[in-house]
Image (spheres, helix red, strand yellow):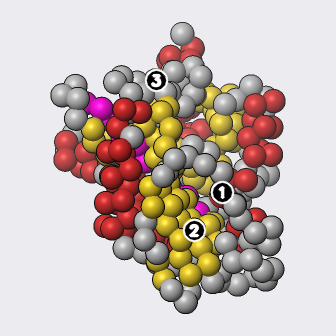
């Protein structure tokens, strides 16, 4: 694992790569009491040529830097951190699976470690990176349709909050709703926002709707980056590729459950899918909303 210590008095210390081990932190550390922490997630893949590649890693470093600023944690040189991560992966390259359905997951984490109570910017912090081989995120497989539960009584994030940052608090607060989704037979929560039940994102992925829009245009639509959703690296990659193809309209726009319901009634929905580092690209098979199934893909019906 990679560890780098920081203090307000001395700045960043020399990076250290050593054996995986438990961390020793003071019981009053700000990460434990006030969630002064953040993390990232990216993957290393082994190609058919046996070379190991990271997928757009600088995008993750940039997002991590934005999260650090929002959390009151120290800034860092994103290129230098990426060099350290690449060195760690190089040392541990034997752990990168030789498989098209598996990869090496990379988890950079930054936590406040100041040994005192008080809601403030920490004077000490620790950045560390751990690795783990992973297969498909969902037990049903990489490309099996996933079922979603949409209930407006829960809100994941709000404008002006930290929904666009990869902070642990965003995930911890979602666990209760996630287990309620499981109780009604769904795998993930589709988070809604506002009185008009605006579609935002799913717990592990950004959401895309491929449809015929209200104007009769073939369109790939996804919610915009307005501070409520996480700016996914896979999300942006899909948008970039779709623009490059030029085969249909690509739009970042607001979508509501009302828009989706109307489109379903008029048979204008072609496909819904999610995208993220964990799940890569995953089709949506079913959406349960207000106790009724509002969307069911051809794969789900089959």
Indicate left or right for 31 with 205 as reference.
right
Which of the pair 199/185 is nearer the observer?
185
- The mark that comes first in sequence, 1 or 2, is 1
Q: Magenta segment, which residues?
A: 38-47
- Residue that mark 2 sits on: 126
Rounded to the nearest angstrom, the CA distance separating label 1 from label 3 is 36 Å
Outermost residue on the bottom side: it is: 9
Residue at 43% in and 65% down: 15
For label 2, the SS is strand
- Residue that mark 3 sits on: 143
**Measured along the vertical axis of the image, is residue 67 above or below residue 154?**
below
Rounded to the nearest angstrom, the CA distance separating label 1 from label 2 is 10 Å
Residue at 50% in and 18% down: 298
Quadrant of residue 81 within the rendered picture? bottom left
Residue 46 is covered by the magenta coloring: yes
Which of the pair 87/47 is nearer the observer?
87
- Please identify the dominant SS of the magenta region: strand
Mark 2 nearby-residue class (10 Å; few <14, some 14–19, many ≥20)? many
Outermost residue on the top side: it is: 302
Q: Where is residue 248 in the image (x, y as percent from the top left)?
A: 26, 42
For label 1, the SS is loop
Asked if labels 3 and 1 touch by Cβ distance under 8 angstroms, the answer is no
Q: Position of residue 157 (x, y in %)?
A: 66, 62
Mark 1 nearby-residue class (10 Å; few <14, some 14–19, many ≥20)? few
- The mark that comes first in sequence, 1 or 3, is 1
Q: Where is residue 184 in the image (x, y as percent from the top left)?
A: 79, 29
- The mark that comes first in sequence, 2 or 3, is 2
Rounded to the nearest angstrom, the CA distance separating label 2 from label 3 is 37 Å
- Residue 23 has which mark? 1
């Amino acid at each position: 694992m990679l560890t780098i210590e920081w203090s307000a008095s001395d700045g960043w210390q020399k990076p250290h790569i050593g054996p995986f081990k438990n961390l020793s932190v003071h019981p009053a550390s700000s990460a434990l009491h006030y969630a002064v922490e953040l993390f990232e997630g990216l993957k290393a893949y082994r190609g058919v040529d046996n070379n190991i590649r990271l997928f757009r890693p600088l995008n993750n470093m940039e997002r991590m830097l934005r999260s650090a600023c929002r959390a009151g944690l120290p800034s860092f040189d994103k290129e230098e951190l990426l060099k350290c991560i690449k060195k760690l992966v190089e040392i541990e390259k034997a752990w990168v699976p030789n498989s098209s359905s598996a990869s090496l997951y990379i988890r950079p984490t930054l936590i406040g470690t100041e040994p005192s109570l008080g809601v403030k910017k920490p004077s000490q912090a620790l950045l560390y990176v751990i690795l783990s081989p992973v297969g498909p995120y969902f037990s049903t497989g990489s490309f099996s349709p996933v079922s979603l539960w949409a209930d407006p009584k829960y809100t994941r994030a709000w404008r002006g909050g930290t929904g666009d940052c990869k902070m642990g608090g965003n995930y911890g607060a979602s666990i209760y709703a996630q287990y309620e989704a499981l109780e009604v037979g769904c795998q993930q929560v589709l988070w809604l926002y506002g009185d008009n039940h605006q579609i935002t994102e799913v717990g592990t992925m950004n959401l895309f709707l491929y449809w015929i829009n209200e104007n009769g245009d073939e369109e790939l639509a996804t919610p915009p980056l307005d501070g409520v959703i996480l700016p996914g690296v896979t999300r942006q990659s899909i948008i970039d590729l779709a623009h490059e193809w030029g085969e249909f309209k690509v739009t970042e726009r607001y979508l509501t459950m009302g828009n989706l319901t109307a489109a379903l009634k008029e048979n204008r929905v072609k496909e819904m899918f999610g995208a993220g580092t964990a799940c890569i690209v995953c089709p949506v098979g079913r959406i349960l909303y207000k106790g009724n199934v509002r969307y069911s893909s051809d794969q789900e019906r089959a």
